[in-house]
Image: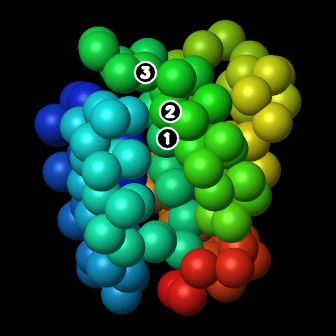
Amino acid sequence: MLVEDDSDLSRVEEFALGAAGYRVVVARDGRAALEQLARERPAVILLDMRMPGFNGWQFIAAFRAAYGREIPIVVVTAAENAQHRAAEVDAEDWLAKPFEVDELLDVVAKHVGRGTAPP
């Protein structure tokens, strides 16, 4: 699952992941992501933190309350220290924007199959 409000970036990520064989579900904010999670569980969640409306921090709080650590979360952020931002919200990993497609594919491959949700 890709939770990203930047439609240009999400299209690039969705294309790259799809070309690598992953099925990608896109949500434009945290609320839409939670609604999608009620229907199906992805293998990994790529989460932008700064989104209008229901942001990444709100999503993580609601997600952890409902699902615990069932699905790995990778924080995708343009913040100065992406690793620190991920640690602040107790995410399993991080990806700093801007990133190369290979970095995206590597971080997803690292976490697919780690959660309890089916890939």
Q: On residue 19, which mark appears?
A: none
Q: Secondary structure at mark 2?
A: helix
Point out residue 40 in the picture as x, y percentages from the top left corner.
Answer: 37, 73
| Left or right of 119 in this view: 64 | right
Q: What's the mark number on residue 55? A: 3
Q: Amino acid at mark 2?
A: Phe
Q: Position of residue 24 (x, y in %)?
A: 30, 69
In depth, the one of 77 and 60 nearer the eye is: 60
Q: Are marks 2 and 1 in contact (CB under 8 Å)?
A: yes
Indicate the amino acid at tag 3: Asn
Tag 3 near tag 2, CB within 8 Å: yes
Q: Residue 75 location, x and y as percent? A: 60, 38
45 relative position to 81: left or right: left
Relative to 37, residue 82 above or below: above
- Image depth: mark 3 or mark 1 in front: 3
Q: Give the residue pinned by disc 2.
A: 59
Q: For this rendering, which residue is in front, 64 or 11?
A: 64
Q: Earlier in the sequence, mark 3 or mark 1?
A: 1
Q: Residue at x 68, y 66 (%)?
A: 70
**Distance CA(mark 2)–CA(mark 1):** 9 Å
Please name the residue that numbered disc 1 is placed on.
47
Amino acid type assigned to the residue bearing label 1 in the image: Leu
Q: CA distance from mark 3 to mark 2?
A: 6 Å
Query: Can you say whether 6 is above or below 63 in the image?
Result: above
Question: Could you tell me how far apart the alpha carbons at marks 3 and 1 are, in whole angstroms?
Answer: 9 Å
Quadrant position of residue 86: top right
